[in-house]
């Protein structure tokens, strides 16, 4: 399998939402995301204004993406289509997001469900300093290598 990773473009937003709504763990529908203020236009504005998102593609199909909030130092999202999990795509997407975050911050952070596969994945990538947020979610941090 060969995949390519590049900076996200405005034309990628639909594919990014398709990936986000395809996941089994931490699934959200488009309507649930809309209720949270996560819309195609909001994400499109972010992609146009700053280096904040990357997509993985295979034959021009978006198969994964990562996204950050650059000003906040937050890894906001990293998702891969279920049929492409375990192939190193998520790892590469997170590494690109980390590189950009560490250009501007000494410590990056994210929030995830403490019992999720994602939490274990991030911890394997060196994220730690776990803080319980509400009994279900945790905040993880990662420091820039000095």
Image (cartoon, rainbow, N blue to C red):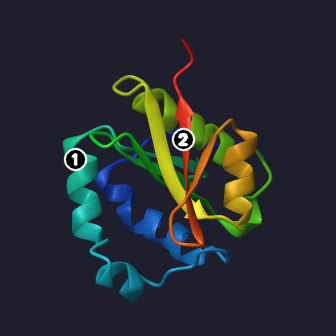
Q: Position of residue 33 (x, y in %)?
A: 38, 78
Q: Position of residue 63 (x, y in %)?
A: 60, 58
**Which of 21 and 73 lies nearest the eye of the viewer?**
73
Residue 76 shown left or right of residue 130 in the figure: left
Q: Position of residue 83 (x, y in %)?
A: 75, 66
Which image quarter: residue 11? bottom left
Q: Position of residue 137 (x, y in %)?
A: 56, 67
Q: Which residue is drawn at 47% across and 84% down?
A: 29
Q: Residue at x 20, y 56 (%)?
A: 45
Residue 94 position (above or below residue 136): above
Q: Residue 141: which numbered mark, if any?
A: 2
Q: Label 1 vs label 2: CA separation?
A: 27 Å
Badge 1 is on which residue?
48
Name which of mark 1 and mark 2 comes first in the sequence: 1
Which image quarter: residue 71? top left
Q: Do the residues labelled 1 and 2 touch (CB within 8 Å)?
A: no
Residue 124 position (above or below residue 59): above
């Amino acid at each position: 399998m060969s995949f390519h990773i590049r900076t996200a473009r405005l034309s990628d937003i639909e594919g990014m939402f398709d990936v986000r709504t395809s996941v089994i763990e931490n699934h959200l529908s488009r309507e649930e995301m809309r209720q949270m203020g996560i819309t195609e236009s909001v994400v499109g504005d972010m992609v146009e204004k700053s280096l904040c998102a990357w997509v993985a593609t295979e034959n021009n199909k978006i198969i994964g993406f990562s996204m950050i909030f650059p000003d906040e130092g937050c890894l906001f999202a990293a998702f891969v289509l279920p049929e492409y999990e375990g192939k190193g795509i998520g790892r590469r997407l997170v590494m690109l997001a980390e590189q950009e975050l560490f250009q501007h911050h000494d410590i990056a952070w994210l929030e995830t469900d403490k019992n999720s596969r994602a939490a274990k994945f991030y911890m394997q990538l060196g994220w730690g300093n776990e803080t319980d947020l509400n009994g279900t979610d945790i905040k993880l941090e990662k420091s820039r290598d000095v």
